[in-house]
Each structure stands twice: as structure tokens, then as C-alpha cells.
Amino acid sequence: MFTEKSRATAVTGSAESGDFNYKVDYKADGNKLIKLHCNVYKKTTETEPEQYAGLMSQENGNKQFSFPQDTDIAPHVTVFDTILSEIKTALEVKE
């Protein structure tokens, strides 16, 4: 007979910091974060679409950052670590 071994929850959300929007997608199994992807967009005027600025992710304990060569990624890494910390805290509270 069928035995369920795990169940993942998919969540989408966003954060803002300065001139950037961070669109977040993550999957969790109970209180364990499985993977997190964060697309970074630069805010523009109301009549122009957002401009894609980069990607940050964490999966299997590894963090990856992909930005254009001349981008100062330090502020984005700080936001990413804050988002990651908030999500992990929220997952711990659920259990």
C-alpha cells in the first residue's frame, strides 16, 4: 500500500528594499526549507516594466548568486540573508 514519505509546500512572496523588488519562491517540507529562489528586479517608472537584475538561490545547503559582472551584490546578499532568516523562523514557528 501507499506510504507517504514527505509532503512539500510551495510558497510565493516578495520583499522590497531600496530600488529593488525581490520575488521569492520556496518549497518546504514541514519545518524544513528545501529550496528558495529569489529573482531580483530593479524598480522603474510606473509606465516601464521592472528590469531583471539577478538571481539568488539556496538549495541543498548551497547558496548561488547570479548577477551581471559589474553589480555590487553585497546589498542583495544582505537582503537575501534576511529573507532566508525570516522564512526559516516562520517555518520553525509552524511546528
Image: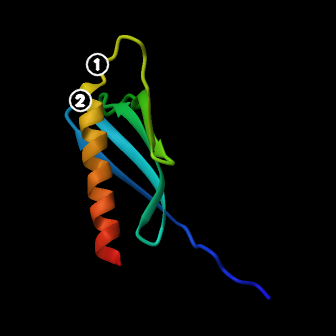
Describe the element under mark 1 as helix, strand or loop: loop
Residue 9 vs residue 20, the one in the foreground:
9
Tell me the amino acid under the disc marked 1. Asp
Q: Residue furthest front?
A: 61
Residue 94 vs residue 5, the one in the foreground:
5
Q: Residue furthest right?
A: 1
Whether 47 is drawn above or below 81: the answer is above
Residue 51 vs residue 71, the one in the foreground:
71
Q: Residue furthest left?
A: 18
Whether 11 is drawn above or below 20: the answer is below
What residue did someone put label 1 on? Answer: 72
Which label belongs to residue 41?
none
Instruction: Tell me where residue 54 appears, x and y as whole percent.
Output: 42, 28
Describe the element under mark 2 as helix, strand or loop: helix
Which residue: 34% across, 76% down? 94
Which residue: 32% across, 39% down? 21
Left or right, 33 with reference to 71: right
Which residue: 55% across, 68% down? 8
Instruction: Tell me where residue 95 appears, x and y as whole percent.
Output: 35, 78
Circles 1, 2 touching at the beta carbon (< 8 Å):
yes
Image quadrant containing the N terminus: bottom right
Left or right, 82 with reference to 66: left
Instruction: Tell me where residue 62 appears, x and y as whole percent.
Output: 46, 40
Quarter of the image where one finds residue 90 = bottom left
User: For the residue carrying disc 1, how many other residues have a C-alpha within 10 Å: few (<14), some (14-19), or many (20+)?
Assistant: few
Tell me the amino acid under the disc marked 2. Pro
What residue did someone put label 2 on? Answer: 75
Visual colour scheme: rainbow
Which residue: 19% across, 33% down? 18
